[in-house]
Image: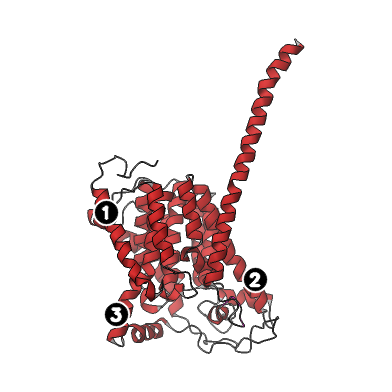
């Protein structure tokens, strides 16, 4: 009897040891990937930041102003961060502390995005693609724009997304979206064109893009925009409230007019882009400079990180958010900043809708769209190799990507880019239909 019990216990012990070994292997498997992603993010940080070039350290003086201005003298755009700073440091804030907070926000965003991508991917090729993106402007922007209020808005969006995922109540989701929109707009008014449409897309997920999709967004955004236009506060509410660099003892001077009105910005943009034929040419060349990286990122995401109908959702979200953010290209110069945020919002909302159960098979995209963007994808290894080569060859890791996109000297890379795109389209039209979405089965 004793022998029989021992015999029965041996398989059980063996299974327990095997399960434990598998768990240990799984736990150890993520470590090399995290090291690779951290190295990519470190490269992005070192190439994109300005930390050793100014007394305000990693934060641009312009972004620092958003952490100092507040609404005690009247309603003021971007007054929320300043109000919090005044509560914490009523005399004069320490630039080093503000930098630490802003760096923590940017680093936390990048870490969250890379971990999310790792969890959502399975194949070696798709996880290698995450490493490529970590060392690209798609992540470097968060280090380039340290202290940017829109980075704080993006961090709040990630928090709101986590809360929305954990509730099935539409009332609670509406409450979270409402609070998020109010906070985001109070931090930076450009959230009206970026994050408010993203919140509307989450709460009213359309199966196809129609006029009604944009009307719903306008109905939510219009009252918030009206509040911004009613801004009657002085441009610098308290000029004597200045930040101090505790390392050097230097006082950071305030900007006299930090946040001009939208009308003034539009006039300045007209002078920048349309004052001469050369400037008009530079204006049109700026579109491929800021869209090149985003389009490659979308191709990587559609081919390696999302599948079938989810890829259609990704393109649909990107088109919707790009159209909603179009006014920003008239009143601001930092186009690379807007397109990068649009890329990440489009991708995150795909996964959020999937977890919320609102990502039903969307209506097919128009045939005209598929004449430009083929739906069938080649093998993952080929897709990653070509896309990564085009992405890294653009040499777009530099401190001014958020404003200018890739350097003008990199524009010749558009030739191999267009050739690769044409070859992809030609290959796609020759593939037999495979049912679900026409995508090639993954190896």
Measuring from the top left, give residue 63's x and y in whole percent. Answer: 54, 78
The answer to whether one can see residue 205 in this image is no
Q: Using the image as rendered, state which of residue 26 and residue 327 is in the foreground.
A: 26
* First in sequence: mark 2 vs mark 1: 2
Q: To which residue does mark 1 refer?
A: 425
Asked whether disc 2 touches disc 1, contact meaning CB atoms under 8 Å apart, the reply is no
CA–CA distance between discs 2 and 1?
Answer: 47 Å
Quadrant in which the N terminus is drawn: top right
* First in sequence: mark 2 vs mark 3: 2
Q: To which residue does mark 3 refer?
A: 281
Question: Which residue is drawn at the image coordinates 58% and 87% (left, top)?
Answer: 254
Q: Using the image as rendered, state which of residue 249 and residue 122 is in the foreground.
A: 122
Quarter of the view holding residue 109: bottom right
Mark 2 vs mark 3: give the one in front.
3
Q: To which residue does mark 2 refer?
A: 100
Secondary structure of the residue carrying tag 2 is helix
Q: Using the image as rendered, state which of residue 396 and residue 153 is in the foreground.
A: 396
Question: Which residue is drawn at the image coordinates 62% and 43% (left, top)?
Answer: 27
Q: Which residues are magenta?
A: 55-59
* First in sequence: mark 3 vs mark 1: 3
Question: Compared to 135, does 66 lie above or below?
Answer: below
Secondary structure mostly taken by the magenta-highlighted segment of the chain = loop
Q: Using the image as rendered, state which of residue 300 and residue 437 is in the foreground.
A: 300
Measuring from the top left, give residue 191's x and y in whole percent. Answer: 46, 69
Secondary structure of the residue carrying tag 1 is helix
């Amino acid at each position: 009897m004793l022998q029989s019990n021992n015999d029965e216990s041996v398989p059980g012990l063996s299974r327990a040891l095997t399960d434990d070994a598998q768990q240990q292997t799984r736990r150890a498997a993520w470590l090399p990937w995290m090291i690779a992603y951290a190295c990519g993010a470190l490269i992005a940080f070192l190439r994109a930041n300005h930390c050793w070039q100014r007394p305000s350290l990693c934060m641009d003086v312009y972004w620092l102003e958003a952490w100092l201005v507040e609404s005690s003298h009247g309603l003021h755009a971007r007054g929320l961060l300043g109000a919090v700073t005044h509560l914490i440091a009523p005399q004069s804030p320490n630039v080093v502390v503000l930098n630490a907070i802003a760096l923590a926000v940017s680093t936390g965003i990048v870490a969250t995005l890379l971990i999310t991508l790792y969890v959502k991917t399975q194949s070696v090729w798709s996880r290698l693609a995450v490493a490529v993106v970590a060392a690209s402007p798609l992540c470097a922007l968060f280090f380039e724009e340290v202290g940017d209020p829109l980075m704080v808005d993006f961090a709040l969006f990630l928090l709101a997304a986590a809360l929305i995922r954990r509730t099935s109540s539409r009332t609670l989701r509406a409450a979270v979206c409402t609070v998020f929109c109010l906070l985001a707009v109070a931090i930076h008014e450009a959230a009206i064109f970026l994050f408010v449409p993203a919140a509307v897309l989450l709460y009213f997920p359309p199966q196809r893009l129609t006029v009604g999709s944009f009307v719903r967004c306008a109905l939510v955004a219009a009252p918030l925009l009206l509040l911004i236009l009613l801004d009657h506060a002085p441009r610098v509410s308290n000029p004597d409230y200045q930040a101090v660099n505790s390392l050097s003892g230097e006082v950071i001077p305030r900007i006299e007019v930090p946040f001009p009105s939208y009308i003034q910005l539009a006039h300045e943009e007209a002078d920048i882009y349309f004052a001469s034929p050369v400037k008009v040419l530079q204006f049109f060349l700026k579109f491929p400079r800021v869209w090149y990286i985003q389009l490659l990122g979308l191709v990587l995401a559609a081919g390696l990180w999302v599948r079938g109908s989810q890829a259609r959702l990704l393109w649909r979200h990107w088109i919707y958010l790009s159209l909603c953010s179009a006014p920003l290209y008239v009143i601001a110069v930092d186009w690379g900043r807007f397109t990068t945020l649009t890329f990440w919002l489009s991708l995150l909302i795909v996964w959020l809708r999937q977890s919320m159960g609102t990502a039903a098979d969307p209506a097919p995209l128009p045939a005209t769209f598929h004449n430009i963007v083929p739906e069938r994808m080649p093998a993952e290894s080929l897709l990653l190799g070509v896309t990564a080569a085009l992405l890294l060859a653009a040499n777009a890791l530099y401190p001014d990507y958020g404003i200018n996109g890739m350097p003008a000297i990199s524009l010749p890379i558009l030739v191999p880019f267009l050739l690769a795109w044409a070859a992809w389209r030609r290959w796609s039209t020759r593939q037999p239909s495979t049912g679900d979405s026409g995508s090639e089965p993954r190896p």
